[in-house]
Image (spheres, rainbow, N blue to C red):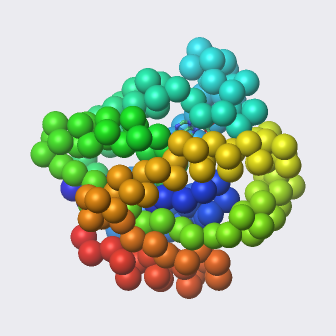
Amino acid sequence: MFTLILFGPPGAGKGTQAVKIAEKFGWKHISTGDILRAEVSNCTPLGLKVKAGMESGQLVSDDLLIEIMESAFLKYSTFSGFVLDGFPRTLNQAHELDKMLMKHGHAVSLVLALEVDKDELARRLLQRAHDQGRKDDTAEVIKHRLVQYQHYTKPLVDYYIVRDVYQEVYGVGTIEDIFNQLCDAIHP
Ligand code: AMP
């Protein structure tokens, strides 16, 4: 089973590219942000619990995320690959993901990081707020989400470099160009 992590800050284009990669390779795209947003809009107990935190740009607790991932893995276990988008976001989540995969004789296959500078990220996120009306894409919350990324998520770069699965791709250009570069790096 191929486990691809699409890595990068909010606004780097992970969601757009994850959909295309999953379609090309026949893998399952798992976006923890999408899963959580669906819980919020369906007003489930989990959704009610995480709503305020998500809307203010906080990370949701590791325990909840690990539960979500475990059930997603079980649900989609027949797929030959996963494209993880938005997970892991903390070192603890990365450890738990390794444990989860190891239980089934698997490991993280590849981490592709989309590199986009801060000004471009802020511009894209504000554009997305305008287009999609996401509550966590206001200027204030964007700033907070980028700080959270630097603090909790950026340290994962070293974690995956050490494991020799980390590769960067420049995330500015046309969607197709970036997609082609990502595909060139994937050898299932
Ligand atoms: P995203 O769509 O990936 O930007 O995620 C939107 C929001 O969902 C984040 O700002 C967090 O509040 C929450 N979220 C998604 N994935 C995770 C994760 N792996 N760990 C913690 N919180 C998450």
Q: Is residue 133 visible in the rendered structure shown here? A: no
Q: Is residue 165 left or right of residue 16?
A: left
Q: Is residue 124 left or right of residue 80?
A: right
Quarter holding ligand 1:
top right
Quadrant assignment for the C terminus = bottom left
- Relative to residue 181, is residue 101 depicted above or below? above
Pinpoint residue 133: horizontal percent, then vertical percent: 82, 47
Which residue is rendered at x = 43% and y = 51% of the image?
156
Pinpoint residue 119: horizontal percent, then vertical percent: 77, 67
Instruction: From the viewer's side, name the closer residue of 26 and 178.
Output: 178
Which residue is rendered at x = 18% and y = 49% of the image?
106
Pinpoint residue 68: horizontal percent, then vertical percent: 43, 31
Quadrant assignment for the N terminus = bottom left
Pinpoint residue 185: horizontal percent, then vertical percent: 36, 77
Q: Is residue 48 visible in the rendered structure shown here? A: yes
Instruction: From the viewer's side, name the closer residue of 180 and 97.
Output: 97
